[in-house]
Image: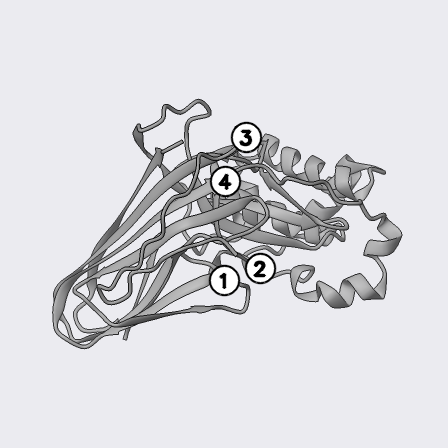
């Protein structure tokens, strides 16, 4: 068997096996929210006919206090019967399998989302509460290191010294900015198996690596933290109706009495340009696409993301 992996209460719809249900997009969003259309297409090519494949796509944006998914559909070529479910971390998964020979597989997720900043502040907790048993039991999985996020003791000590005696909320933001100062964004410099310390010592990486490093440091300092998968509109000032080349993106959230989101790659808060797909301990919990297949080897895959501001 071979593996494939691709990069990366509102109303929504989903196309499964060619059947689509669509809801109206609704009225114009408030001024601090953007309505975005995202088209994420992954195309796999194989060296010959693949006999069987089993796949999962995480291409349906969430509904939350800062984001409303108005429409969402997942299209599969060749056509396949699929079903959707929520995974352990809360992301919507479209699962499907194919048992007719095929030399190419194309999976396209199309969504319309209204996104903006978090609408309300929360009361910030102190270190005493975060170190208490109640918080540690509740967020144990988001405090423990993973193979992709573990950080060395000397790096943790260096960052702890740099942060100083800041409170938890200030510490979260300071760690995000420190990582961005120390790491350069360089497309293609790493792969999905690169871990946090490899990226840290090289001083460069993509958004996935910068987020893994940040999550690892937040956890080692005592802040529950999670990896967030989604999309970013690349332009701070975007014309309505203009389609641009976007990207799969990753950022982080930490808990200090409530969840705080920050994009360390761009050193900015998460707001109207960010569309959330899912969360987990690291990238391994929320890849946009993964699967296994039986047949000739893969000749590679291509991913395109197009983002259009609709309002």
- Crowding at dot 3, Cα within 10 Å, few <14 / some 14-19 / many 20+, comes out as few
Viewer-nearest of discs 4 and 2:
4
Q: Nearer the viewer, residue 295 or 81?
A: 81
Q: Which residue is mark 4?
A: 115
Horizontal relation, residue 98 to residue 156: left or right: left
**Residue drawn at 41 percent across, 65 percent down:** 93
Considering the image in quadrants, where does the N terminus appear? bottom left
Viewer-nearest of discs 2 and 3:
3
> Mark 2: which secondary structure?
loop
> Quick check: marks 4 and 2 in contact, CB under 8 Å?
no
The image shows residue 49 at horizontal and vertical percentages of 11, 69
* Circle number at residue 281: 2
- Crowding at dot 2, Cα within 10 Å, few <14 / some 14-19 / many 20+, comes out as many
Considering the image in quadrants, where does the C terminus appear? top left
* Circle number at residue 285: 1
> Mark 1: which secondary structure?
helix
Horizontal relation, residue 67 to residue 16: left or right: right
């Amino acid at each position: 068997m071979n593996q494939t992996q691709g990069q990366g209460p509102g109303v929504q719809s989903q196309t499964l096996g060619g059947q689509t249900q669509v809801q109206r997009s609704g009225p114009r969003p408030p001024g601090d929210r953007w309505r975005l259309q995202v088209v994420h297409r992954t195309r796999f090519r194989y060296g010959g006919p693949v006999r069987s494949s089993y796949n999962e796509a995480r291409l349906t944006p969430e509904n939350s206090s800062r984001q409303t998914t108005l429409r969402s559909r997942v299209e599969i070529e060749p056509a396949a019967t699929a079903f959707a479910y929520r995974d352990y971390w809360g992301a919507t998964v479209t699962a499907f399998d194919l048992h007719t020979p095929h030399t190419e597989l194309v999976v396209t997720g199309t969504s319309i989302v209204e996104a903006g900043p978090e609408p309300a502040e929360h009361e910030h907790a102190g270190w005493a509460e975060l170190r208490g048993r109640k918080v540690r039991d509740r967020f144990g999985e988001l405090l423990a290191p993973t193979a992709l996020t573990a950080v060395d003791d000397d790096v943790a000590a260096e960052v702890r010294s740099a942060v100083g005696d800041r409170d938890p909320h200030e510490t979260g933001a300071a760690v995000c900015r420190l990582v961005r100062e120390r790491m350069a964004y360089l497309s293609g410099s790493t792969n999905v198996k690169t871990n946090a310390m490899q990226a840290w010592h090289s001083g460069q990486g993509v958004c996935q690596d910068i987020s893994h490093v940040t999550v690892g440091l937040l956890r080692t300092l005592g802040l529950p933290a999670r990896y967030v998968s989604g999309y970013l509109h690349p332009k701070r000032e975007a014309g309505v109706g203009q389609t641009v080349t976007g990207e799969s993106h990753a950022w982080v959230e930490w808990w200090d009495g409530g969840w705080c989101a920050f994009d360390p790659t761009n050193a900015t808060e998460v707001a109207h340009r960010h569309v959330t797909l899912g969360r987990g301990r690291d990238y391994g919990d929320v890849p946009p696409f993964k699967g296994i297949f039986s047949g000739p080897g893969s000749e590679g895959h291509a991913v395109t993301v197009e983002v259009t501001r609709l309002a």
